[in-house]
Amino acid sequence: MEHALDITLTVNGAQVARRVPACTHLVDFLREELGLTGSHLGCEHGMCGACTVRVDGEIVRGCLMLAVQANGCKVETIEGLSDTGELAKLQKAFHERNALQCGFCTPGMLLAARDLLKHNPKPDREQIRAHISGNYCRCTGYQAIVDAIEEVVNGKG
Amino acid sequence: MKAASFAYAKPRTLDEALALAARPGAKILAGGQSLIPSLNMRLSSPELLVDINGLDELKGIRLDKDVVRIGALATHADIEKSDVVRKHLPLLAEAVPHIAHPAIRNRGTIGGSLALADPAAEYPACVLALDAVIVATGQKGERRIKASDFFKGLFETDLKPGELLTAVEFKAQKKDEHSAFLELARRHGDYAIIGLAAFAANGTKRLAYFGAADRAVLAQNAAKAKDLESAKAALAKDLQPTADLYHSSQTKLHLARVLLERAWNTLSTLR
């Protein structure tokens, strides 16, 4: 039985092939192997949401998926989604609304917020809160984050 | 923390998966939303992970006459989006949004959750309330287990070593049947303080509580009671809730009664 496997995946549009230990999770792979340090590791057991990345179009906990499981998948991170401009409105609103202080949760928060708007373009505040409930922020108290997302919803972002 | 080293295999067929699962030190990887945290925290250190996500026959949700069959690999998100579930299993449709958060619902599976048998999880109570059948497959063949015989204790089920939970079968809810799902948690998506999955058909009720004991439990005395007040009183015979860090046993019993009161009208008046 193999303890390390060859994988090929697409990360932010570029094809990547590597040999990885089976026990390496996706975010360690992205950070340590590919140098994509925008996805953060907070708790490493699925509570904090700082490691949120997109796999085949849907957000996942990067720490709760093995890198080998991403074989053949299309992975998108904060780096790629910033470059394509997909997060631009949210990023601007977060900046203007002071929706971050230390910024540790921000990449995951932006991906969760974008995921909400993709599935539901007109959420109310309660729906916004429910959708980001899996992302911890220890600085802002969440009000400013909800405000920023709401601003984009209302077309002001 | 980081997971200890393990080998990994992704079988292409069920037979291959069962052969791998029978090896000593093997563990099944479904959605991984409970297993991977326990690996990362080194609470579990299997020698081999058998990733069953390549088994297409374990996926999908389908209605076959009056039975809804949900494959073990159906994710919480699949169930949340399913028209079949919304129409024929409203209890399950109501329960799913309470499970963790969107990013976790995208990967966690119904089979994984049932096989883990977390006492605070939503699905075990749902399968008890709906009297569902759990389908398990081993090298010797398939077994069909009634939900009420499946849960044996804290994280313990009737699954034998090497057996794989492959599907769950529910009777489609009929027009004159009613259900209610209620959960109390400190924050959306947190583990339940206490929750209730309730079902009523032909004047009989099935009240399954979760977060109340070492497994989901049917409150049988309360279910037989004729009116709400006697049902609430009878709950003390059905539940001796385990206290947690924040809630005493008495508080949980009180909250169990609150949920029963909230569910009662839905279950009783709309016959």
Image: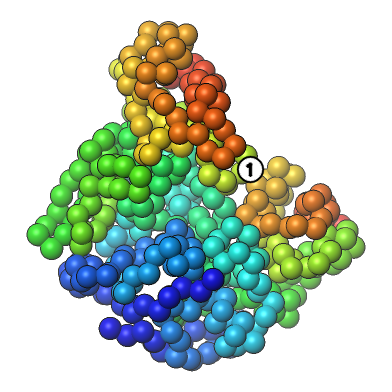
Vertically, is A91 above or below B218?
below
Task: Give the image location of residue B166, x and y in percent.
Answer: 26, 56
Front residue of A134 and A23 = A23
Q: Which residue is mark 1?
A: B187
In the rendered image, which quarter contains the C terminus of chain B? top left
What residue is shown at x 75% (from left), y 44% (from top)?
A: A125
Vertically, is A15 above or below B22?
below
What residue is shown at x 57% (from left), y 46% (from top)?
A: B190
What residue is shown at x 36% (from left), y 66% (from top)?
A: B29
Front residue of A94 and B270 = A94
In the rendered image, which quarter contains the N terminus of chain B? bottom right
What colouring method underlies this structural image?
rainbow
Q: Chain of mark 1?
A: B
Task: Give the image location of residue B54, x and y in percent.
Answer: 33, 71
Q: Amino acid at mark 1?
A: Arg
Task: Give the image location of residue A82, x and y in percent.
Answer: 73, 76
Determine whether, in the image, residue A64 is placed left or right of residue A4: right
Q: Secondary structure at mark 1?
A: loop
- Quarter of the image for residue A19 reads bottom left
User: In the rendered image, is residue A11 in sight?
Assistant: yes
Q: Residues within 10 Å of mark 1 (few under 14, many from 20)?
A: few
